[in-house]
Amino acid sequence: MDAKSQLELPTPPTFSQMMEDLDIMTSDDKIFKLFQLEQLIDQCEDQSSSSSNRTPVEQTYWLINKFLSRLKTLQDLDTTITTQNDAIIEQTPSEKTMRTVAIIGGGVSGLICIKCCLEAGLVPTCYEMTNDIGGLWNYDANAVDGKASVMKSTVINTSKEFMAFSDYPAPIEYPNYMHNTKLLEYFRMYAKQFQLTNHIRFRTFITRVQPADDYEQTGAWLVYSVNAEEADRRTTENEKCEKYDAVMLATGHHAHPRWVDFPGLENFKGTKLHSWQYKTPHGFEDKVVVIIGIGNSGGDMVVELGRFAKQVYLSTRRGSWVLNRVGPNGWPADLYSTSTVACTVQRYFPWLVNKLLERDMSKRFDHELYKMKPKHRPLQQHPCMNDDLPNRILCGSVIVKPDIKEFTADGHGIVFTDGSKLDHVDCVLMATGFSIAFPYLDEKIISVQENHVRLYEYVWPSHMKHSTLAVMGLVQPWGAINPITELQARWAAKVFKGELKLPSRSKMDEDIDDKATKMRERYVASPRHTVQVDYMEHCDELADHLGCRPNILNFLKTDFKLGWKLLFGPYTPYRYRLEGSRKWAGAREAILTQDERVRYPLCAAQDNKQGIEWTSMFSIIAVVVLLFIVVRCFV
Ligand SMILES: Cc1cc2nc3c(=O)[nH]c(=O)nc-3n(C[C@H](O)[C@H](O)[C@H](O)COP(=O)(O)OP(=O)(O)OC[C@H]3O[C@@H](n4cnc5c(N)ncnc54)[C@H](O)[C@@H]3O)c2cc1C
Ligand SMILES: NC(=O)c1ccc[n+]([C@@H]2O[C@H](COP(=O)([O-])OP(=O)(O)OC[C@H]3O[C@@H](n4cnc5c(N)ncnc54)[C@H](OP(=O)(O)O)[C@@H]3O)[C@@H](O)[C@H]2O)c1
């Protein structure tokens, strides 16, 4: 037996066969498919290095064959239309069996979408304008137009168990609040594990997404792209157009900085930057800096610059409640404060939660004394998480100021609404939030007014005839975004497949209006409070659409340990993989071991102690309240 048959290598194609296959492709497709070949080779190298003793020639035959069979599959699915000088050349597939989905954006939401589409048997193509995955978590020393960004020191404010992928927990040794580089590593592992990058076309900027000519009948979309490196992205000369059965928009909502105007700002001679542009404290040493806005961007910049600048002033027009990442006993605050019981209490007794939160936060520092006490209650704003802010204020490196009245005519000073004045300011940093935008979409499809968007469950434009366009990750929760995006993407994939249907337009509109009213009633009026959701309640709502909300009563009967954890333990995303389609066999284990993964990076060598939520004061109070209600109602 020769070496080739020993290894069961398929018959290699002839050179002319290979050329025939390549001939029918456009040059862009060749580039893309060669890029896929590169990735395939990497994978094969990984596999072959561990498994075989093929000679280089055998290995090459094997790779070529694999490449060609792969191309064959891709061609069968290909629905490419190419525009060249406005002429449309359609390559209709001979037998189209699967629905194609374009995913715009290769940040974490894009990765999630690819995975959910693959799992649902859809064919995803993800477009990413940069040359890498990760979106805003992929730190760039320069702010990139149209891309959200983090500063070099940004650390997540949702803990690793709380923002984990529901079927892929972060490594046990990873810290609970990860630095952006660590989070990116986690995303890379996820992409590798589920082989997601093969489906991304990097350096491809989407210029337009519009309904296809036959949209009315098919619900199909045209996606126009250009090479992202082209100097002027607005050019339509080299646009490529491809047709898809459905589209997922995953371009984030922190990419378009919102600048705010103040009287006299045009006179200001110092540096003006938005938090989106701020990267490091370098260059701010010994400067007088005014930071406007006390969201999490403002908070992060204030505490960082408070250690480098000559003096930092924090201007806030209405103050804020400030939460800690570090919860009681050093446990991550979000794990401590979320559970099914806590969710129920918050829903029916928000006044009680407000009271408890105010009490805890005021105990840490008197918000009135620190000139930060707002008129509103904690649950009426998006949370500001900052463990170091009171410390900086107490040290005097940060001074809190009210809103800005005007910039002085000499171009150096600022007058505040309380009449106080700064004569010389070097830099003004606006941490005034972001505008939601879909620059590649006609506003008739999704219109944004002052950051208000009309979407059913923040996903579906209800007025469209077909459910083939879905927005991903466009929520701002009291909690983490990724687990919500996952549920949205699982849902959208099933809708695209035709396995689930959306309600009627009138029902969707009713729900949109209802949510908008509730948001208006609850939150302080501000452009930052337009896509606000309660994490636990919203996850459950999406899980209901999908049929994967765990039935806790059943679990209490059949698997008490797990049921108890679901009831009193933190609201980690693994719970949505216990039931329904796309269950994950590891979900139970992930839930029962989440405390270990929290504890491990802190004290790997110590014995495991009892989880903190068993003693969580919040849960105990919640149980007492529930018992009280049960007794009042039924006894
Ligand atoms: C500073 C900061 C810190 C945050 N911290 C947290 C946190 O701790 N926890 C949390 O849950 N959330 C946090 N968020 C919210 C965060 O935005 C989401 O959690 C999530 O990372 C967003 O991912 P995304 O993929 O939806 O968007 P992004 O990460 O913004 O990715 C969008 C991608 O789309 C690409 N893109 C955009 N336009 C185009 C186009 N026309 N063509 C092709 N590609 C395009 C971009 O290049 C980018 O890669 C934070 C946000 C900011 C700004
Ligand atoms: N470390 C982290 O994890 C981290 C870091 C940064 C950001 N983030 C996330 O990124 C998102 C964006 O946060 P962000 O802080 O950039 O924006 P943001 O939450 O929208 O906060 C904007 C701030 O600017 C103020 N502001 C807006 N317009 C103003 C005006 N005209 N005059 C005065 N003040 C004005 C707002 O005050 P009002 O409340 O009065 O409107 C608010 O304090 C959030 O989801 C946040 O959690 C996370």
Image (tube, grey):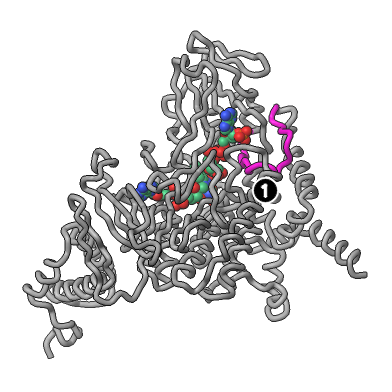
Secondary-structure class at tag 1: helix
Left or right of 497 in this view: 579: right
**Main SS type for the magenta part?**
loop
In what quadrant does ligand 2 lie? top right
Q: Is the CB–ligand 2 distance for label 1 below 8 Å? A: no
Q: Quadrant of the C terminus?
A: bottom right
Image coordinates of residue 544 in percent, x first then y, are: 61, 68
Name the spot of residue 178 as percent of width and height, x first.
51, 50
Viewer-proximal residue among 292 and 86: 86
Image position of 245 with respect to 240: above or below: below
The residue located at (71%, 33%) in the rendering is 374
Q: Is there any visible trace of residue 401 in the rendered image? A: yes
Q: In the shown orientation, is residue 119 left or right of residue 562? A: left
Residue shown at 57%/57% (left/top)?
Answer: 457
Name which quarter of the figure residue 243 lies in.
bottom left
Q: Residue furthest left?
A: 16
Q: Is residue 269 highlighted in magenta?
A: no
Can you tell which quarter of the image residue 551 is in?
A: bottom right
- Tell me: residue 39, above or below residue 129: below
In the visual, does 152 lie left or right of 378? left
Residue at the bottom extreme, as displayed: 1
Give above or below for 96 relative to 1: above
Question: In the rendered image, which quarter is residue 590 located in?
Answer: bottom right
Query: What residue did someone put label 1 on?
Result: 517
Q: Is residue 379 magenta?
A: yes
Q: Nearer the viewer, residue 523 or 453?
A: 453
Instruction: Tell which of 464 and 370 is nearer to you.
Output: 464
Residue 495, given in percent of the width and then of the height, sits at: 48, 68
- The residue depicted at 54 percent of the width and 66 percent of the height is 502
Q: Crowdedness of circle 1 by 10 Å Cα count: few (<14), some, many (20+)?
A: few
- Read off the magenta span: 371-389
Q: Amino acid at mark 1?
A: Thr
